[in-house]
Amino acid sequence: MSIFDKVKEEALHQFIEVIEWLDNTGDTIVYRFPVAGQEIKNGAQLIVRESQAAVFVHEGQVADVFTPGKYEIDGGNTPILTKLGAWKYGFNSPFKSEVYFVNTKQFSDMKWGTSNPIMLRDADFGIVRLRAFGGYSLRVADPAAFIREIAGTNAQFQTEDIEGQLKRSVVTEFSDALGELKIPALDLASQYKELGEKIRGVINEDFTSWGLEVVKFYVENISLPEEVEAAMDKRASMGALGDAQKYMQFQAADALRDAAQNEGGGAGLGAGLGAGFAVGGQMANAFGVGTPGQAAPGGAAPVAATVACPDCGKPNAAAAKFCAECGSKIEVAKVPCIKCGAQLREGAKFCSDCGSSQEKQKCTGCQQELAPGAKFCPECGTKVETAA
């Protein structure tokens, strides 16, 4: 080989380039290959790996997008040559172009969350404030559109460069979807999957114009304010407690058992019973159960006396004559007729059996009330005149 041929071969080797990118970061979306002077020589090799796309930008415009594979720029078999039209100096002349590698894999560690509470009108609690957070996976669906709309001419574009913008968009769509669905706050936990799918579809309508696609969207938690959660806990406790009267009996039984195990004997028994009845009484008062006429703790009004309806069992005021629930007549205390002894309702003016007036007879001499059947007044001795 002559010296001229050797120099020619070495010059040819200098023209050959390998354009490829090995990502070792895990969060880089776009990487601009560092081509010296943006000049790509004839014979250069382009290697695009799986989950990558190579975008050629010539004179500020996206010229072509290459999918995974191996390409050789030889002036005939690469589509970019016809689109660029940059080979007017022959096959050995370089052309200026920028090569951007776009990572098309799923970026699955993306987080979102509400920085401020979301106001929501709820059927159970009225107006409530909700906080929520979760995650989503993202990928570049259209590399050319993503470079045009988002990445621009950045030499390296990472997920953190767009995370803030994406998070704001996600929270906005989440708030709109939550308001439109009108899911009660107590049922939100059972609707996380359905809510995530609906929000993903709405978000992709906006992200498509950026060349992005949300593959998965997760709602991890939706939390209520602490005071609302406390009220829910109290309501659940009341439901678990059940009958307050049975709870009082249970407390008394526990006190008896503890007193029997106490070495103090009778003193322990009395103290245990007292504690059991005291706690049981407090629980009964808290749930509106107590002895009629007994004052409630803290100086509250005494519990009103009631009488149960004989048909439906609904409690009614003691003076009620008919049930407020079913309209049935309520039987009250009985008193004997002053003449025949038949059982009458307390307050009756005439006997339903003999028709006698139930007003007590008075002495005609001194107006003293007489006992039933008296023949003489015990006060003045006047003879009692009986009706014919």
Image (spheres, rainbow, N blue to C red):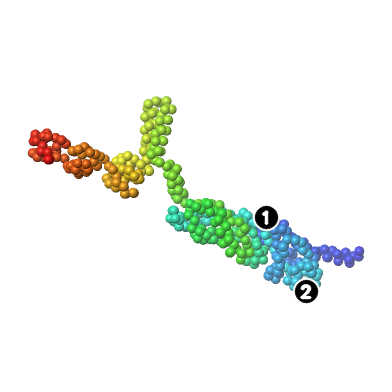
Disc 1: which residue: 25
Q: CA distance from mark 2 to mark 1?
A: 39 Å
**From this viewpoint, is residue 18 visible?**
yes
Q: Residues within 10 Å of mark 2 (few under 14, many from 20)?
A: few
Q: Can you tell which quarter of the image residue 216 is in? A: bottom right
Q: Residue at x 34, y 44 (%)?
A: 311
Q: Secondary structure at mark 1?
A: loop
**Sequence-wise, which precedes: disc 2 or disc 1?**
1
Q: Is residue 215 left or right of residue 270?
A: right
Identity, as a three-letter code, of the amino acid under mark 2: Lys
Percent across and percent down for residue 293 are: 29, 41
Q: Can you tell which quarter of the image residue 300 is in? A: top left
Q: Residue at x 43, y 55 (%)?
A: 126
Q: Can you tell which quarter of the image residue 268 is in? A: top left
**From this viewpoint, is residue 302 visible?**
no
Q: Secondary structure at mark 2?
A: loop
Percent across and percent down for residue 190 are: 53, 52
Percent across and percent down for residue 125 are: 44, 53
Of 138 and 93, nearer the camera is 138
Disc 2: which residue: 88
Identity, as a three-letter code, of the amino acid under mark 1: Thr
Q: Is residue 198 left or right of residue 388?
A: right
Quarter holding the N terminus is: bottom right
The numbered disc on residue 230 is none
Q: Residues within 10 Å of mark 1 (few under 14, many from 20)?
A: few
Percent across and percent down for residue 276 are: 39, 34
Q: Residue at x 76, y 67 (%)?
A: 78
Q: Residue at x 86, y 66 (%)?
A: 8
Most extreme residue toward the bottom is 88
Q: Is residue 244 left or right of residue 168?
A: left
Of 327 and 180, nearer the camera is 327
Q: Is residue 43 left or right of residue 161?
A: right
